[in-house]
Amino acid sequence: MEVHSTFVTEDIIYAVDTSQNKIFSYDKESHELLQEIGTPDAPLFNEGYPFSPTHLAVDMRGNIYVRSSESSNGLIMLNRAGEFVTFFGANPLNVPLLDQIRSFFLTETQQQAMETVFPNIIADVSIDQKGFVYTVTSSLANGAIKKFNVAGTNYFPDNLLGEFNMESIWVGQQDSVYAVSSDGWIYEYDSQGQLLFVFGGNDVISSRFGILSRPTSIAATSENELIVVDQGAASLVKYERTRFTEAVHQAMSSYQQGEYRVSQELWEYTLNYNSVFDNARIGLGNAYLREGEAQLAYQEFMSAEFTPGISAAFWEIRQDWLSAHLNTLFVLMMVGLILWSLWRLVKKFSRRSISLTHKLQWLKKYKFVDNFLFIFEFHQAIFDGIYTIKRRKRVSVFFSMILFLLYIGLFLMYHQWTNVIFVADNPYLLYELATFIFVVLLWMVSNYLICSINDGEGTFLQSVNGTAYAMTPILFVFPVVILLSNGLTLEQSVFFYLPQAIAGLWVLFLQFFVIKDLHNYEVGETFTIIFKSIFTMLIIGLCVFVLYTLGSQLINFILDVITEVSAR
């Protein structure tokens, strides 16, 4: 017998024998053999599906979750009697984008001849006292660890921080999740999948104390000691908690038990050790939130840049504000309703009902005002608006430049004044602004070049004016979105993202017909022109990148030569 792994319940010891591909169960007290589980008697396994168990976990109902070394469908779930139930917790199938595109152009025979893509195979399995099943996959970096309920729903975030080659997983006290990679790094997560600690390291030559060579398995004792099997050094390595680590776990435990004041004090204690420990800020924010101190919780979550916590605290702050100002808001709404009703009555019974547009006709003699009012006319009658840009030359390039400056201003406002719940502070704002300007310029140049060699009738300045007016939905939507975001939480995020999506689609719709009617193309020709323009953008962008790289190297070389000469 070659025992590869074991699992112990209150009454039974389970052992995996890799030499026979079997699972044996023994009585915990007498060590008497109770059961021998081999390949399940199910049609799938009778047809040759591999059953090569290496690890297992057993829940409180006696169901056995088996990790098989060749099972691409996830864990093999067996009932108490060893009968096959279903597959559990499989990793999603990730087909490379190139293969997905290529499959559209291949025949059925060619597709069958392609190399088959299988899901990533699970490396280890564990289970907690509540019945949640944990898996780790060594071939994944982000999202390598998953936490499943009995229905197979993953409760850990898909972008959970980790690394390749995670070999083993264990669930300890307070539902702390430990994982070790073959590179020697040990990761600890809380019950929500938030990374708490990373320690260890790889040391093949010097064998420094506490540094691992080739770890293969990890476990935790009831005394909260970590034990790692280091196959490379042929040893067991034991880790004990420091005072700081113990304080963190005590704070987590106190919070889970409802002792929020104690948890708050412990988190403050941990901040004395490490003032930039974000998990302490998050824990302190949660404790404040439970104590009804939403403003303090908001400040702690902001310090940790923890978006879900910021949203929860902001919801409480908003509720308090609405409760305090509900009467004022109701009075303002009633006054607004009365004024609107009076305006309707005056307009209905007035003998001289003159439209607002007619009253503003005299302002159109000013070119700037006329170009501004044309925005509304453009949206009321798109095709007439494009014809006006093309034939009547009503729109000036100067006003189009003003529109582009407004778009730049809205871009900056969007990143500076939008609620941090939706748009976090961006240290690369100027870089993204430059990218935005470059892409818009590149689009206008590329599109005009393609149109000019495909018998397009429009000029470059007309294309610039058309693009400027096609982007005007941004002026209508984004100021409202920016203002609205400061009263929303994550639960109402649809009211933040939906208007932006509609504005984006409306801009694309307008841009399509600007190209079509400005250059007198058919619908099919317009799609071809757009695809060619995008391809041209990529080519020009690649050339600019190459020139930028070569120019940077040339400048660095010249500076190095000047420095060398001046040093001599």
Image: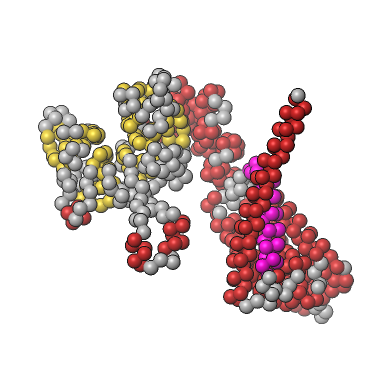
Location of the C terminus by quadrant is: top right
The residue positioned 46% from the left and 61% from the top of the image is: 101
Q: Residue furthest bottom?
A: 351
Q: Characterize the magenta stretch by its predominant secondary structure.
A: helix
Tell me residue 346's x, y (percent).
77, 74
Q: How many numbered marks, from 0 up?
A: 0
Image side of residue 462 versus residue 7, left or right: right
Figure coloring: secondary structure
| 500 lies above or below 87 | below
Residue stretch rendered in magenta on the structure: 425-451
The residue positioned 39% from the left and 43% from the top of the image is: 139
| 284 lies above or below 523 | above
Location of the N terminus by quadrant is: top left
- Tell me, yes or no, whether the highlighted magenta stretch contains residue 54: no
Tell me residue 414's x, y (percent).
67, 51
Tell me residue 116's x, y (percent).
34, 56
Of 28 and 341, the residue lying toward us: 28
Of 89 and 457, the residue lying toward us: 457
Tell me residue 449's x, y (percent).
69, 66
The residue positioned 35% from the left and 30% from the top of the image is: 215
Image side of residue 104 versus residue 299, left or right: left
Of 33 and 99, the residue lying toward us: 99
The residue positioned 60% from the left and 62% from the top of the image is: 535
| Quarter occupied by residue 519 | bottom right
Tell me if residue 346 can be seen: no
Tell me if residue 7 can be seen: yes
